Amino acid sequence: MLVLSRQPLPTLDRRRYAPAAGSRAAPTCSRTPRPEIRGVLIASGSELSLAVQAHDKLLAEGIRSRVVSMPSWEIFEHQTPEYRGQRAAPAVKARVAVEQASTLGWERYVGSGGRVIGMTTFGASAPLKALQKKFGFEPDRVAASARELLGNR
């Protein structure tokens, strides 16, 4: 699968982040061992770099998280339960999904105790950075959402 964007996005350094090779769907980007994971950040496409930046902020504070790239729900759902569990760490309830479009459907991956950062309105017209700030598409806001969920546990 090729996932392309019109936005300028950073290239993930695969020496630092887990490789995507060999993954059938939803590769994990962080190398955090499962027993140490306290939060899961899920994103697709251009939002992946935002989740990775939030992960780095949390890691700097000693909060271990996992970043899951989910470019296709359909492909993910066709994987075995074991595969989905390895990626999504179902025991971890502090989950944040980031989607710069509609939030519709992401609740199935974050659960009732998770949070989806996304659009709940038709949108707005403004420069990209202004819109990202307005709607919470910034690493600090994603990290803050994860922290809030962990603080409530």
Image: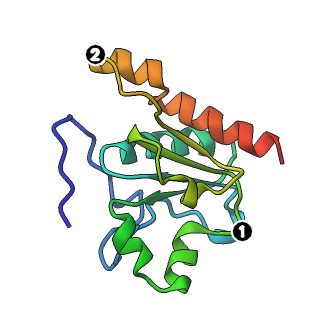
- Residue at 40% across, 68% down: 27
Q: Which mark is residue 78?
A: none
Image x and y of residue 93, in percent: 71, 58
Q: How many marks?
A: 2
Upstream in the sequence, badge 1 or badge 2?
1
Q: Amino acid at mark 2?
A: Ser
Residue drawn where x is 28% and y is 13% of the image = 126
Type of the residue with mark 1: Ala
Q: Quadrant of residue 8?
A: top left
Q: Is residue 75 left or right of residue 63?
A: left
Cα distance, mark 1 to mark 2? 39 Å
Alpha-carbon neighbours of circle 1 within 10 Å: few (<14), some, or many (≥20)? few
The secondary element bearing badge 1 is classed as: loop
The residue at 80%/40% (across/down) is 151
42 or 36, which is in the foreground?
42
Residue contact between numbered discs 1 and 2, judged by CB atoms under 8 Å:
no
Circle 2 crowding by C-alpha within 10 Å: few under 14, some 14–19, many from 20: few
* 11 horizontally vs 41: left or right: left
The residue under label 1 is 91
Question: Which disc, if any, is residue 125?
Answer: 2
- State whether residue 105 is above or below residue 133: below
Q: Is residue 67 above or below residue 77?
A: above
List x then y, in percent, for residue 116.
55, 43
Q: Position of residue 51 (x, y in %)?
A: 46, 44
Foreground disc of the pair 1, 2: 2
Answer left or right for 131 relative to 95.
left
- Give 153 or 64, whichever is nearer the viewer: 153
Query: x, y percentage for residue 79?
Result: 43, 82
